[in-house]
Image (cartoon, grey):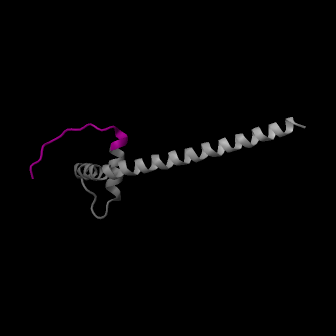
Amino acid sequence: MDAVPVLVRLPRDQVDRVDQWRGKQPGLAPSRPEAIRRLVEIGAHCEPYVAKLLKHLEEAAEAEFNEVQETVAALRRVLMEAEAATGDL
């Protein structure tokens, strides 16, 4: 394997999360360096799927927002009609 040594400093909370992940792996827990290598691979592999998921979520949120705006506009029209009707009394 052609490998290049990389020294990385991680905040304590990230190291703790790596260690927690290691502990959840089946069988013998991977070493910390092996865990970091695996997590980098997982992250690199998942990135396109996460980007696609975020795009779908944004589109769904926009559709929901548009639906809420339409409902608010309809309610305003009803209220304006009601005000106009009561003003005629």
Residue located farthest toward the left when viewing the structure as drawn: 2
- Tell which of 77 and 25 is nearer to you: 77
> Is 76 on the left-hand or right-hand side of 83?
left
User: Residue at image x 25%, y 56%?
Assistant: 30
User: Residue at image x 9%, y 53%?
Assistant: 1
- Tell which of 25 and 72 is nearer to you: 72
> Is 87 on the left-hand or right-hand side of 27?
right
Residue located farthest toward the front when viewing the structure as drawn: 88
- Tell me: residue 76, above or below residue 42: above
Number of numbered discs overlaid on the protein picture = 0
Residue 46, image x, y percentages: 31, 52
Residues drawn in magenta? 1-14
Residue located farthest toward the bottom when viewing the structure as drawn: 27
Residue 47, image x, y percentages: 31, 49
Task: Give residue 27's quadrant in the image.
Answer: bottom left
- Tell which of 87 and 52 is nearer to you: 87
Q: In which quarter of the image is the C terminus?
A: top right
| Magenta span main SS | loop
Task: Give residue 70's quadrant in the image.
Answer: top right
Magenta stretch contains residue 49: no
Residue located farthest toward the right when viewing the structure as drawn: 89
> Is 83 on the left-hand or right-hand side of 89?
left
Residue 17, image x, y percentages: 36, 47
User: Residue at image x 12%, y 47%?
Assistant: 3
- Tell me: residue 10, above or below residue 46: above
